[in-house]
Image (cartoon, grey):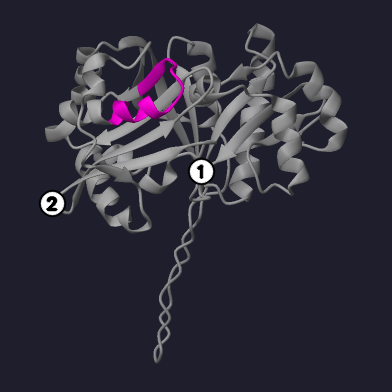
Amino acid sequence: MSYVRSFGLGDIPLLRRLGGKGTLLDVESVICGSHRPLVKALGNYLTFHRRGVYTFVLDSEGFIQGRDRPSGLACDIVYIAPSWDDSSEGIWYRLVEGFCIGKGEEGAGRIFVKLREEESEEVEVFRKVGFRGYARRQVFRGDEIPPQVLGADKGSLRPRQAGDEWGLQRLYSSVTPRPVQQVERPEDIPLYPMMREYVAEEEGEIIAYFCLMPGKEGHWMKAVIHPQAEKRLVRSGLRLFSAFEACPIYCEARGYEEGLRSALREIGFEYLFEELLMVKHTTARAKVPAAQPVVSLETKAEGVPTVSSSKR
C-alpha cells in the first residue's frame, strides 16, 4: 500500500501529469500570480526545504502542497491534485491525513485550509480528518480604484516597523473574537511575494493594519481596522494601490467585520463568494513541572495527544 511522503526528484513525472489537474485552495495565489506546482516543488527541494511551498506525494496517485506561516508553528494547505470528483475522495483523504501527520511531526501545531462551503463533499473530507470551522470570510472585488478613494488622506499611514508588534497585538485583540484569537495569532499572517504591510497610527496607538499583495492579474488587500475608524481608513488603505499597475482589487472581510464589509460595499466593491476557514490542531506541548531547588515533588504525568485523525 502506498503512503504519503515528502517530494523527491523521482516524483517529477507525477507532478507533470497532475500539475494542471488539481485544486488550488488559496485564492490569494490565484489573484497575485500563477501557481505552478512542479516549479514550487523543485524550488523548495533545491533550497533544502527553506523556501516557498513544500510538497507531499501519494505514490502514483496524487500530491498535496502547503506553505508555512511565519511563526513556523502553523501552515496552510494550498493545493491538492487530482481535482475533486467521486473517484478522488479516498485520495484526498489519504493526502490530507498524511500531510497532517507529516507536518505535525515537524512541529506544526495548527494546519489551516480555506474552502467554499457549498463544496460540501470536500468540506466533509477535511472534517473526517479532524478539521473544524472557526470563521468565515467574504471576498469582494473592485474593478478599479474609485475616484473618491484617490482623494483619501494617507497621512496617518506608514510602513510597518519592527517595533509595532505590541500595538498590532492590541489592535488584533480589540477587533478579533476570542475563539478566533485562540486559533490565529498576529504573527501567523501568511507571507507572499511582493507583500507590503502598512499601519495607521493616531496619538501613538495603531488603529489599522493593511497587508497589500500586488500582482499582474489583480491585487489583494487584507485589513484589520478598529471599528470606530473603518469607513475612513478603508479608503486610505485602498489608495495605496495607486502606486501599482491598474488591476482589479480583491479584499477579504471576516464574518465579524461588519463595518469593513459595509465600507467596501459603500465604495462600490462587489461581493464574490464566501469561504469557510478551517483548522486542525495536530500536537500539544508537554507540561513540564517547574524545577524545585530543595524539595522534589512527585507529579502525575499528563498524557500528550499525538497526531491522529478522527474517522466517522
In the image, residue 61 lies at what x, y percent? 78, 21
In the image, residue 196 lies at what x, y percent? 43, 39
In the image, residue 152 lies at what x, y percent? 21, 27
In the image, residue 144 lies at what x, y percent? 36, 13
Type of residue at label 2?
Glu
The residue at which mark 1 appears reads as: 69
Query: Which disc is residue 31 wearing?
Result: none
Going 23% across and 45% down the picture, which residue do you hit? 171
Is residue 208 visible from the viewing direction of this image? Answer: yes
Query: Which disc is residue 203 wearing?
Result: 2
Give the residues drawn in magenta, as a range.
Answer: 237-251
Q: Secondary structure at mark 1?
A: loop
Type of residue at label 1?
Arg
Q: 263 or 299, which is in the foreground?
A: 263
Going 64% across and 23% down the picture, which residue do you hit? 80
Image quadrant where residue 125 sits: top right
Is residue 312 visible from the viewing direction of this image? Answer: no
Magenta residue check for 247:
yes
Q: 257 or 210, which is in the foreground?
A: 210
- Left or right: 21 in relation to 130: right
- Left or right: 305 in relation to 255: right
